[in-house]
Amino acid sequence: PAFISGSIAADSLAEELERETLTLLRVSPLSVSEIIDGKAIAMVGIAPAQAGLWLLFLGLNGTAIANPLEILVLVGALTGVLVVVGAALAFRIGVRREAQLLYSLLALALFGGSLLLPENPPNLVAKLAIGSPTPVSHASIVALAVASIGGYLLIRRWASGQQFE
């Protein structure tokens, strides 16, 4: 879900730029920041919602999950980072096909590179789920959340200053 959210963000924003419909949206009372907010909130919100349903179904099937809230925060933060990457590529490239290709390659590289970390995402989810997170686990979640929020604020600020003609 996190990878798909970033892909949809890249696709949606690049299509708006490519077809010049972002200019039409500017006629509405919404600012560019508010348009980005709407797209980002939808994309970042869907992955933790889906993960929450998975956790709920696991619980209903008798599988105990130790730290569901932290898992949802992790999913939200990771999704936020990928949505920021997708949005940045869309605004930088502005062509749907190229933005999608580059996003896909970059997302795979980021995920592959993250597997080299001692607290990589799959390992971190497993540690949280079985109730054995370490202080590094919690620091990793905080770092991802800070990167997600900071990246979003940067892309939002940058896009607000752009002229979309």
Image (tube, grey):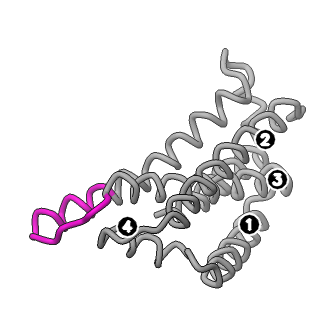
Residue 111 in the image: state x and y as whole percent: 62, 76
Q: Mark 1 points at which residue?
A: 97
Q: Which amino acid does label 2 sit on?
A: Leu
Alpha carbon distance from label 3 to label 1: 9 Å
Query: What span is colored magenta in the figure?
Result: 52-67
| Mark 1 → mark 2, Cα distance in angstroms | 24 Å
Q: How far apart are marks 1 and 4 (CA)?
A: 37 Å
The quadrant in which the C terminus is found is top right
**Which is nearer the N-term, disc 1 or disc 4?**
1
Residue at point 90%, 32% (across, down): 163
Crowding around mark 3 (Cα neighbors within 10 Å: few <14, some 14 to 19, many 20+) is many
Q: In which quarter of the image is residue 116?
A: bottom right
Give 102 or 53, whichever is nearer the viewer: 53
Residue at which label 4 appears: 128
How far across and down, in percent of the image, does residue 65 sit? 24, 65
Q: Examine the image and state in which quarter residue 52 appears.
A: bottom left
First of labels 3, 4 by sequence position: 3
Vertical comparison of 162 with 12: above or below: above
Q: Which amino acid does label 1 sit on?
A: Arg
Amino acid on which the number 4 mark rests in the picture: Leu
Q: Name the residue under label 3.
A: 94
Q: How far apart are marks 3 and 4 (CA)?
A: 38 Å
